[in-house]
Amino acid sequence: MLTAVLTSVQKNPDDDPCSCISNDVAYYLADADVELPLADKTARQDVEQTSRETRSWTLEDNSMLLRNRSLDLFNYWIRWAGFYSARIIWMRRSLYQRCMAQQSIL
């Protein structure tokens, strides 16, 4: 179901103007270890889109809006970094378990 939501939002980006839905769904997919390439692609797109948006910000813009969008960007980066750290930890554990299994066979 989450994959369907994410695919729908990607096809109709106007339904998710601040990337909040797509980023949340990508996070849940990654956390569930499901559709990892799609989750990674979405997380990257959300970070890039919001980063591009910041280039047009000025001090005259609504400070509350800028604060909220800055927090969104920070959360997108943290989730994206967390996604990769979790994958690295998972790969290290998996490799360790395989090595231990090989040693027990010998």
Image (spheres, rainbow, N blue to C red):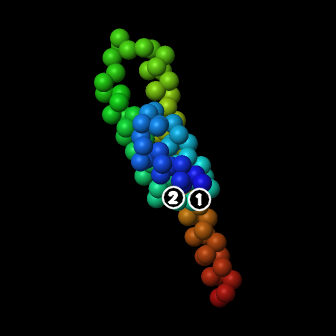
Q: Position of residue 84 (x, y in %)?
A: 50, 52
- Furthest residue in direction top, as rendered: 60
Front residue of 30/105: it is 30
The answer to which image quadrant residue 58 occupies is top left
Please name the amino acid that badge 1 sits on.
Answer: Asp
Q: Is residue 53 above or below residue 99?
A: above
Q: Which quarter shows the N terminus?
A: bottom right
Q: How many marks?
A: 2
State whether residue 98 appears in this view.
Answer: yes
- Furthest residue in direction right, as rendered: 104
Front residue of 105/81: it is 81
Q: Position of residue 72 (x, y in %)?
A: 49, 31
Q: Position of residue 38 (x, y in %)?
A: 47, 56
Q: Position of residue 11 (x, y in %)?
A: 41, 48
Check disc 2 and report its element: helix, strand or loop. helix
Check disc 1 and report its element: helix, strand or loop. loop
| Residue holding disc 2 | 36
Front residue of 15/92: it is 15
> Do the residues bearing badges 2 and 1 touch, measured as CB atoms within 8 Å?
yes
Q: Taking 43 as reference, is 106 left or right?
A: right
Identify the residue at horizontal 61%, vertical 64% (top origin): 93
- Furthest residue in direction left, as rendered: 56
Q: Taking 33 as reference, is 72 left or right?
A: left
Please name the amino acid that badge 2 sits on.
Answer: Leu
Between the residue at mark 2 and the residue at mark 1, the CA separation in whole angstroms equals 6 Å
Q: Taking 27 as reference, is 58 left or right?
A: left
| Residue holding disc 1 | 33
Q: Is residue 2 above or below residue 58?
A: below
Identify the residue at horizontal 54%, vertical 49% (top origin): 5
